[in-house]
Amino acid sequence: MKLIDRIISAAGAVGFSDGMLRAILPLLAATVTLEPAAVAGVTVFFSLPWLIVSIPFGPIVDRYDPVLLMRLINLSRFVGIGLLLGAVTLGGEGLPLLYVGAFVLGSAETLYEMCAQVIVPRYVDKENLAKKNGHLFGVTSSLGGFIGPAVGGLLVGLAAGWAVSVSALGYVVGVLILFSVPTTPSESRPQRPRFLPQVKEGFAYLKEDRSLLSLAIIGGGATVCWYAWTAIFVLAVVDPTLLGLDPSAYGIFLAVMAAGSVTGSFLIGPARKAISMRVLLILSLTGWAIWFIAAGVTSNIYLIGAALFIGGLSGVTWNVLTITLRQSTVPQELLGRVTAVYRTITRGGRPLGALLGGIIATTFSLQSAFIALGIATALLVLPLALVLRHTETD
């Protein structure tokens, strides 16, 4: 098996556990309280690391071997798993511990994802970047978005402790696979410059590349809406006054969305050959708007499921295209730093969005929140079209 395929396999195993936890964390919170702000707090703490650790970690990715870093990151996840088990044991008193565990696991996911994006161009030429990125997203989407959430949602409905314990299996497999991937000898890596100048270089490059910076800002706005939706959708599923479904249905909804992601990962290669990147990105953001607004305008589970499928397809299209664009234009020696700054802008919207979702849903209603998120995302389509009009994307 090629080294890049081993790395993708490890990402799939890790993605399975990440997917389980995406279903488990909000459901654990929802078993304690149905207060939107309290449930959204889990998503806030899980996504907060993008604002705190991503920029400092960028130069570290450029300075050290990413395979070694990915091994260490996976091992650190077991601390988070232990905290979640403690929260389950404490029951209703375990919400603070649940928040801490979410932060630890969110930090690990943040750092691992950055390493995975930086490592792909080291093993793949530019002509095949989109293809391999599609493979990476296909594997992680199928295991992390399709199978993982379904298993997590089912198990947490049966026994929360077992659900958390089983979620650690993917991390074990991921570590074992990564130990079969050789690290880069220290003499073959460039001399390590000072830390702070490296951080500044990442900011400076993105500041000069106005198109990439504009995409990051628009992506950040969409991410705010995405995580506002993520923080409160679980309540729409289990609240008796709304959909009123069994907790396992939440995992099924996430699996439907992941099915869209898997479909998109296979279609993105052929679509990219037939359709310009500009049109695909605009269609992708439009799909996000449909995804967010659906639960606010209908209680039909099939229509909501269809919207989630569209959202999954749109999400993977956006991610693959923007990551490929960044990987093919940013110099390899700067990619870690630039990725850190870029992802801070985009993924930094996660905790802000989760907090916003909880506030809107508490102040008004869940339906109002979903409608507002859909409209806000749709309004981002126009600036995106204007940015891409002046950008070479074909």
Image (cartoon, rainbow, N blue to C red):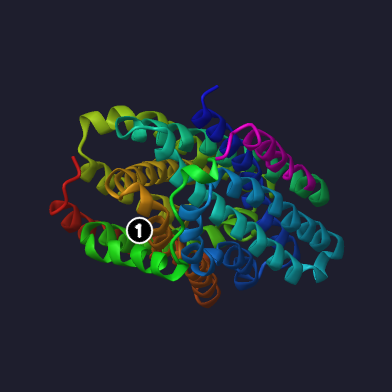
Q: Quadrant of the N terminus?
A: top right
> Magenta includes 172?
yes
Q: Magenta stretch containing residue 30, yes or no? A: no
| Residue in view at x 73 percent, y 64 percent | 98
Residue at the limit of the structure toward the top, as seen here: 1
Instruction: Describe the element under mark 1 as helix, strand or loop.
Output: helix
Q: Is residue 183 left or right of residue 86?
A: left
In the image: residue 141, left or right of residue 321? right
- Label 1 neighbourhood size at 10 Å, few (<14), some (14-19), many (20+)? many
The front one of 89 and 34 is 89
Question: Picture coordinates of residue 322 (x, y %)?
Answer: 33, 48
Residue extending furthest left?
390
Whether residue 308 appears in this view of the structure is: no
Q: Residue 145 location, x and y as percent?
A: 56, 41
Query: Would you place residue 4 above or below residue 319 in this image?
Result: above
Can you tell which quarter of the image residue 334 is in?
bottom left
Q: Which residue is mark 1?
A: 219
Residue 358 seen: yes
Q: Which residues are magenta?
A: 165-183
Give the residue at x 29% y 62%: 206
Please report the residue visible at 52 percent of the width from the left and 77 percent of the height from the top.
Answer: 363
Query: Mostly what secondary structure, the magenta segment?
Result: helix
- Front-most of residues 76 and 303: 76
Inspect the image, locate mark 1, and give the three-letter code of the amino acid beneath it: Gly
Q: Quadrant of the C terminus?
A: top left
Q: Which percent across, then down, holds residue 104?
A: 66, 61
Q: Residue 379 at x, y = what percent?
A: 27, 62
